[in-house]
Image (tube, rainbow, N blue to C red):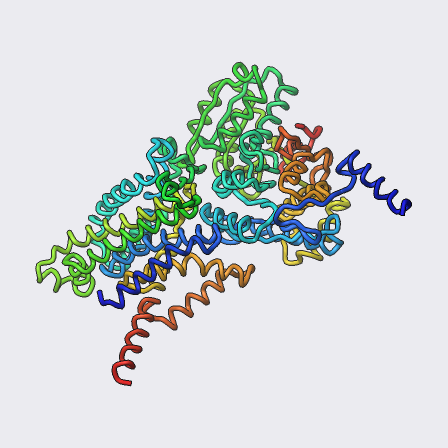
Amino acid sequence: MKLKLIPIAALLAAALASPTALAQKKYDQGASDKEVLVGHINPYSGPASGYGTIGRSIAAYLKKVNEEGGVNGRQINMITYDDGYSPPKTVEMARKLVEQDKVLLIFQPLGTPPNSAIHKYMNAKKVPHLFVATGATKWNDPKAFPWTMGWQPNYQTEAKIYAQHILKTKPNAKIAVLYQNDDYGKDYLKGFHDGLGAKAKTMIVKEASYEVTDPTVDSQMAQLQASGADTFFNITTPKFAAQAVRKAWDSGWKPVHYLNNVSIGVGSVLKPAGLEKSIGLITTSYLKDPTDPQWKDDAAMIGWTAFMKKYYAEGDLTDSFNVYGYAVAKTLVQTIKQAGNDLTRANVMKQAASLRNFEVDVLLPGIKINTSGTDFAPIESVQLSRFDGTTWVRFGEVMGK
Amino acid sequence: MSRRDILGVVALLAGACVLPFVVSEYRTFQFTLVLVYAIALLGLNILTGYNGQISLGHGAFYAIGAYCAAILMDKYGVPYWATIPVAGAVCLVAGFLFGLPALRLEGLYLALATFALGVSLPQLLKYHHLEAWTGGVQGITITKPDAPAFITELGLALDQDQWLYFFTLAVAVVMFVLARNLLRGRIGRAMVAIRDNHIAAEAMGVDNAMVKSLTFGISAMYTGVAGALSAIAIQFVAPDSFNIFLSITFLVGIVIGGLASISGALYGALFIQFIPNVADEISKAAPWAIFGLFLIGFVYVMPAGVAGAIRMAMARLQRKRQNP
């Protein structure tokens, strides 16, 4: 009898000493010994259905994880709904996932308007709204919205990187900025100002904006050139980016030219602008590009290709959205893994905010995911690349946090 | 109204009142949307079903109503219930003004003109100079109303979804009663006369131009009121919420529900709210193909819409009862 009591006493003592050592299982709705139920919303139809492949690659990756035994012995089951990029539908689907399907969390809704529509709801319900697929900076606001977190580098982060690069390589630069006059353009502009800090006032000699409805940006480009600037930050969407790149070259200005990541498509922007006129453009990237020949023998990309062939055979092997889906799904799996047996919503959010130097193999070498209670921006480093006339060539160190 | 009709309406209302207490919050929210769509469909049905004018752009009036409510609540602190009549009035004027030039257009040409309205409005909402009010592409987030104090004093504990449902139900009942009175009266008969033969209507002294513009205005008003209610229920408006597909959905709703039928609006609303979800559950790969099958099935089985099918079934039942 006494002998039997000893282990119990020991256990009790251990439990008193450190409550977590017992690994007591705690669950919120959507989690159990068998499974973790995850909700997902993606546009499979409608104007943004091109992003649908992200949802399919995520589902394929989770299938792979489950076949290999799941996470901490639990299967990760994902319910995915189509919102057609329509905010009212996103609200309906988010409510369905939370109130009817009773998921533990909602993962990766796509687009700024759909996420804006459920931002308040998710935070009022205290349901993790994780790794949303948009570049806006407002998802990194842990004080006001402790249940929402972004994933990809946001616009401000990217702009700060350009600012750092300018400060390092050309501290006396005279900078001209062209930006689209909306939230996206202003987000970039704010990050750029913040990155330059006190020197923003003296270094930026001219800012010009355009409206999406403008036919061209020629007059803005003439103003910027006349300012005598030698460095140019180009915050434009594809059509205007092509115009600005061409004009900067044709007018003989030829400044050091930073182009935002939004418009780096070779086919959609640089070809129309003129490939030879695009040589020397500087931008940023964070994912390994499946079409880039330098990753031909890279273990991570070979692994990704094998995964695609086995679990998502109909997926396009040249589409970087499939790399994106794979990478973001790995981040989710890591978060759930870290949560261990405490699968409460609060702990999931805590673990999402406790990713330390987490590496996803399809991100560029040296880019690590870091979050904290005050930092809800998982990827904050990128690498600069320069256009050589045919492709983007990475250079320098990984920059950012 | 026959006694049977009155009994039917009373039973329907009683069922509608019990509903939010027996289903989940999420379902209550869905039924609120059904009521919202029913009001919008009623508006479109007045125009298309009763007056014979086809509109492919009613999503635009829905958007105007929604933005009226959102801007008034967000920028001017107007209480949510007061935004409904304002949204209705703004859309009445907008619809009437749009109806004036549109008068010259018949049938498919009018459909094209309204289509233009439907496709252009989301982009106009993104227009920079309106951004101070519309919030541009980011849209406007609004707060969901709580049940007012007097409800709690009555001893009823309604959560936000339940309260919003009853509020929407009350608006819907008022709008349906008004529509019924309008359509059964002189103006309603004039509308139908124009639809059936506008030359004969003119000969009988109907002011075609006036009645058509007015019908357009009233129809837009109904849709605008629905838009305002939807903004309050969804708590968010953005240009992407009101794409051209919404206008097409409304047209689908009135045809499925039953043209020129008041109750048809309700059936149509149930269809456009629930069938896409059912289709999505049947097949993730091709939900719209499934939706298409449903659509073809309905049109084939019930060529006069759900309301028409029910009417025919009732008539047959009555005939059987009279001569067994």
Is residue A81 found left or right of B121 in the rendered image?
A: right
Q: Residue at 23% across / 58% down in the picture?
A: B180
Residue B310: give x, y in percent of width and height.
33, 70
Is residue B124 found left or right of B85 in the rendered image?
A: right
Judging depth in this view, the residue of B25 and A250 nearest the camera is B25
Q: Residue at 52% across / 59% down in the picture?
A: B280
Is residue B228 found left or right of A34 in the rendered image?
A: left
Quarter holding the C terminus of chain A is top right
Q: Is residue A344 above or below residue B18?
A: above
- Furthest residue to the right? A3
Q: Residue at 30% across / 61% down in the picture?
A: B9
Judging depth in this view, the residue of B71 and A186 nearest the camera is B71
Q: Residue at 40% across / 52% down in the picture?
A: B33
Q: Is residue B206 visible?
A: yes
Q: Is residue A388 visible?
A: no
Judging depth in this view, the residue of A247 and B158 nearest the camera is B158
- Furthest residue to the bottom? B324
Q: Is residue B3 above or below residue B61?
A: below
Residue B186: give x, y in percent of width and height.
14, 58
Residue B176: give x, y in percent of width and height.
27, 55
Is residue B202 found left or right of A113 in the rendered image?
A: left
Residue A26: give x, y in percent of width and height.
68, 44
Q: Is residue B251 above or below residue A4?
A: below
